[in-house]
Image (tube, rainbow, N blue to C red):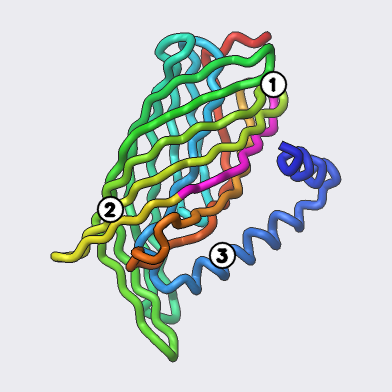
Amino acid sequence: MLLIISIVEIMNKKNHQFLIYLLGALTVLYASSCAPAYVPNVINTPMLSNKGEFQATVNAGLAGFDPQLSYAITDHIGVMLNGSFANRTSDSTDDFHKHIFVEIGSGYYKKIGTSGRFEAYGGAGFGKLQAEYENELWMARSDVNSLRFFIQPAIGASTDIFDGSFAARFVVLNLKQESESNTGIFIEPALTAKVGYKYAKAVFQFGLALPLNSNTIEFNYQPFLFSVGLQATLGRKWE
């Protein structure tokens, strides 16, 4: 939570170059990650408040274009639908990356006092990824189908102006390429900050993808999560 506050303070000081430099550095790392077969999507942390609340979010970042929908079907049960899409090519080389990924989830949320929030979601998703990366030393290719299951607890706070949360997504991922398959287990901690006023907020997220079975993983993966986006909220009962 302190890190989230620090990010907001930096933004309030109009030091936007920090985000530009960070995005640039992560983009360079992404480009050199040897045709990753797994690119984690943006973590959806809605921090819902009441039955009937609906959120629609669009994100852009290292994973590509990530739309998200969330809805509270009761005062404690929420559902979500998330996607991730990318189609990147190089003008000077044959390098490319494209993927499509869709997941659904449901879970429990609870208000803690006026502003505090706790939530835990679980779900599953599937997708397709193709990529090629080549330099003077090596060439790497990926053409995989993915099936992923996740459990995602999160804690945070939500106000009219600011939402902040820390989530830890636990992932079991199976990738299949032709007749070969491999399973990876990841923990993906992420900090999310949402700044605006009530119905519309800018969204910022930074996180990591950390393998728990690195000795048996046989595929490359993108180790960072970074995105910026916009969120619209309807149906919330504001305090």
Magenta-highlighted residues: 187-197
Instruction: Please give the residue where the numbered disc 3 appears in the rendered image.
Output: 27
Position of 48 with respect to 163 (left or right) is left
- Helix, strand or loop for the magenta stretch, by majority: strand
Q: x, y (%) of residue 61?
A: 53, 52
Please give the name of the residue rendered at 49% of the width and 35% of the height, measured from the top-left corner: 44
Please give the name of the residue rendered at 44% of the width and 39% of the height, measured from the top-left corner: 67
Instruction: Please give the residue where the numbered disc 2 appears in the rendered image.
Output: 174
Q: Which residue is more in the foreground, 196 or 50?
A: 50
Badge 3 marks a residue whose secondary structure is: helix
3 or 2: tag closer to the N-terminus = 3
Q: x, y (%) of residue 187?
A: 48, 48
Quarter placement of the C terminus: top right
* Number of numbered markers: 3
Please give the name of the residue rendered at 76% of the width and 57% of the height, measured from the top-left corner: 17
Residue type, label 3: Thr
Mark 1–mark 3 distance (CA, rounded to whole Å): 32 Å
Position of 183 with respect to 48 (left or right) is left
Instruction: Please give the residue where the numbered disc 1 appears in the rendered image.
Output: 159
